[in-house]
Image: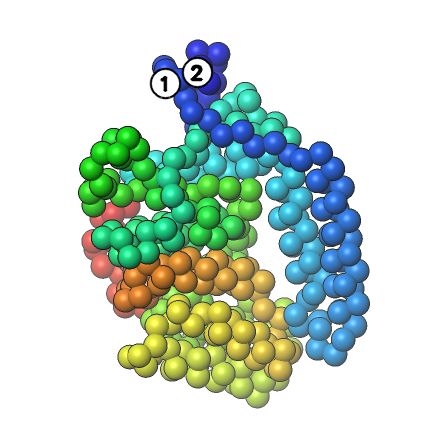
Amino acid sequence: LDPAAGAVCGGEPCKAGPIDVALKVMHPGAAALIELDLDLLELCARLASVLPGAAVLDPIGVAAEFASAMRAQLDLSVEAANLDEFAANFAHEPRIRFPRPLWPWVGREVLVEELMLGTPVLHSVGSPHAALIARIGLEAVLKMLFLDNCVHGDLHPGNILVLDRPAARGGGPPLLPSDVALAFVDAGIVKRVPPGAFHAVVGVLGAMVHYDGRLAGELLLAHSQGEAARPGEERDAFCAGVDAIVEHAKRPDVAFFDHIGEYVGTILHLAWRHNVKLEPDFVAVAVAVRVVEGIAHQLDPSVQVAPLCRPYYRRALLEHGFSRLPSFLAPVDESARAQR
């Protein structure tokens, strides 16, 4: 593609010279097929909603949220806008890249974007830079979650690439640590948590990372529907169950985020048992973290996620007005304030 034709990359005119591009085109008939699938999903959700205890899990609401995310993917201009937002959020992070959409060659059914040359992240398992790649990827997702409130919603390994160094494409020397960079592609699904729920989600994850299970349970209850009418014994039993999860995570042979899928399942069971309707954004964010944490552990089995979370949580306290939350975490250090 010749940028002289007036293309705009990331809000600015493209640089002179040819640009390698990827072309994404909506398949004819895809929208109709997806709508049929979503109608079937809604029917199943309505049938499930009459089962005992189903109201707590809200199958109709979950199906509606999934349908909304799928319909957003049918408009490729939405993905282009997501890519521009990610690029702006990571403008000062040279190790993280996103494809630049080339406006005006973007529409509902067509997306022209910068081609990212690289290899899927799990191809780097066993490489000399595997641990570094794991850390870069984890920190990128923690930034999305704690600081940007804009989380890539499709974080499977094929959508995270280890970028080629230009010289290496022609058989040049291997990557150096300073060359390692990742690209996140296929940003049609993005998770943004509403402001009130965002404070709750970050607070719950922060409490768990700092092993305060009782407070994590109380925060989950405080943002659940019908909390005020819940009997005291139900509240205590739910909080005790969440605290038991965190106590398990405190064991030296257990990594909290390595078991987050199991823990989320246990919390959902506790919610069903004690009639607690959880904030659905907590589950969505926890699953996203679990996926990328699993990728990181394949690259570096020794990686510890909780220590990486803490500075991002502290920065979130400073940057998003969390001062009204209880000071249940370690004191915010001045180095975090200096990073703003």
Residue 201 in view of the camera: no
Residue 31 in view of the camera: yes
- Front-lying residue, 316 or 288: 288
* Relative height, residue 88 to residue 104 (above, below): below
* Relative height, residue 16 to residue 28 (above, below): above
Label 2 – label 1 distance at C-alpha? 7 Å
Q: Position of residue 306 (x, y in %)?
A: 32, 66
Q: Label 2, on which residue?
A: 3
Toward the front, the furthest residue is: 171
Q: Amino acid at mark 2?
A: Pro
- Front-lying residue, 151 or 291: 291
Left-right relation of 38 to 253:
right
Q: Amino acid at mark 1?
A: Lys
Which numbered disc covers residue 15? Answer: 1
Toward the bottom, the furthest residue is: 233
Element type at marker 2? helix
Which numbered disc covers residue 237? Answer: none
Residue found at x 72% / y 46%: 34
Q: Position of residue 87 (x, y in %)?
A: 41, 36
Whether the residues at callouts 2 and 1 have beta carbons within 8 Å, the answer is yes
Q: Position of residue 135 (x, y in %)?
A: 29, 55
Which of the 4 image quadrants contains residue 284? bottom right
Left-right relation of 78 to 314:
right
* Relative height, residue 56 to residue 177 (above, below): below
Q: Residues within 10 Å of mark 1 (few under 14, many from 20)?
A: few
Residue found at x 65% / y 70%: 57
Left-right relation of 70 to 284:
right
